[in-house]
Image: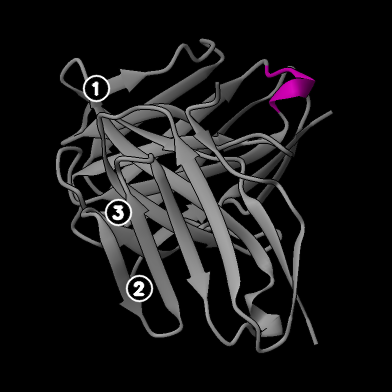
């Protein structure tokens, strides 16, 4: 299997639930990213990990908690989300943060908060 | 001013025509420029990237970069209905030692059969 794989593809959860999104990359990249994509808005960068270390957190609410156990796996733990958090969550990877190589995206998780 | 600006469209072109998609950016520190295609309900897929002023061609796609004017464009020759999608412009820049990817909102392209 190649590329960037995200699971689940769709997730419906209540505001009090706890769930996790998973991302796995098979490209040998050292940097991984979480993005949020809402309708009619640009992609919003949430978190950046480089060699398993979080290097960027763009003022994301604490109800989103990332985890990067190794350079191939990235998780986004969700807890007590709000309806406005409904969006497409995209994982991406790149060779490393400093190179000019592009990012490769997974198919995303479509999240709906009831 | 938005950091990366694109006309949201839709841009409609007849099949076989040239589609021209434009993107302007505000930060002169921008170093790398990317075009992604995103079909409805799918993830962004890299089409082209360009670092230097001028044109870069890959098949039916040509990326054009003009750093002095701070714009980057994507030309699609012989447009096909399968090219109908949203095209995202992305810019990578360095700011205070950190690296940032900034995306535009995308231009929706419709190729009419």
Chain hosting mark 2: A
What residue is drawn where x is 29% and y is 29%? B28
Q: Is residue A65 left or right of residue B92?
A: right
What residue is drawn where x is 47% and y is 32%? A76
Seen from the viewer's position, the closer of residues A21 and B18 is: B18
Disc 2 residue crowd, few under 14, some 14–19, many 20+, Cα 10 Å: few
Marks 2 and 3 belong to one chain: yes
Seen from the viewer's position, the closer of residues B62 and A97 is: B62
> Mark on residue A1?
2
What color scheme is it?
one colour
Question: Dividing the image into 4 quarters, which one contains the N terminus of chain A?
Answer: bottom left
Q: Which range of residues does the magenta coloring cover?
A: A81-85
Question: Dividing the image into 4 quarters, which one contains the C terminus of chain A?
Answer: top right
Q: Is residue B98 left or right of residue A112?
A: left
> Disc 1 designates what residue?
A55
Q: From this viewpoint, is residue A26 visible?
A: no
First along the sequence among labels 2 and 1:
2
Predominant secondary structure, magenta span: helix
């Amino acid at each position: 299997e190649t590329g960037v794989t995200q699971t689940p593809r769709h997730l419906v959860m209540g505001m009090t639930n706890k769930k996790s999104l998973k991302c796995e990359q098979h490209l040998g990249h050292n940097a991984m990213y979480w993005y949020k994509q809402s309708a009619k808005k640009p992609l919003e960068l949430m978190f950046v990990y480089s060699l398993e270390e979080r290097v960027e957190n763009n003022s994301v609410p604490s109800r989103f908690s990332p985890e990067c156990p190794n350079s191939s796996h990235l998780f986004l733990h969700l807890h007590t989300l709000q309806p406005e958090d409904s969006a497409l969550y995209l994982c991406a990877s790149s060779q490393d943060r400093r190179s000019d190589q592009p990012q490769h995206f997974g198919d995303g998780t479509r999240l709906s908060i009831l | 001013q938005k950091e990366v600006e694109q006309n949201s469209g839709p841009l409609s072109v007849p099949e076989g025509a040239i589609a021209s998609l434009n993107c302007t950016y505000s930060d002169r520190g921008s170093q790398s420029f990317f075009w992604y295609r995103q079909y409805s309900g799918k993830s962004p897929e890299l089409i082209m990237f360009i670092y230097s002023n001028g044109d870069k061609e890959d098949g039916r796609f040509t990326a054009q970069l003009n750093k002095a004017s701070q714009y980057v464009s994507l030309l699609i020759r012989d447009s096909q209905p399968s090219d109908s999608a949203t095209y995202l412009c992305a810019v990578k820049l360095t700011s205070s030692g950190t690296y940032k990817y900034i995306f535009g909102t995308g231009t929706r392209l419709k190729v009419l059969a």
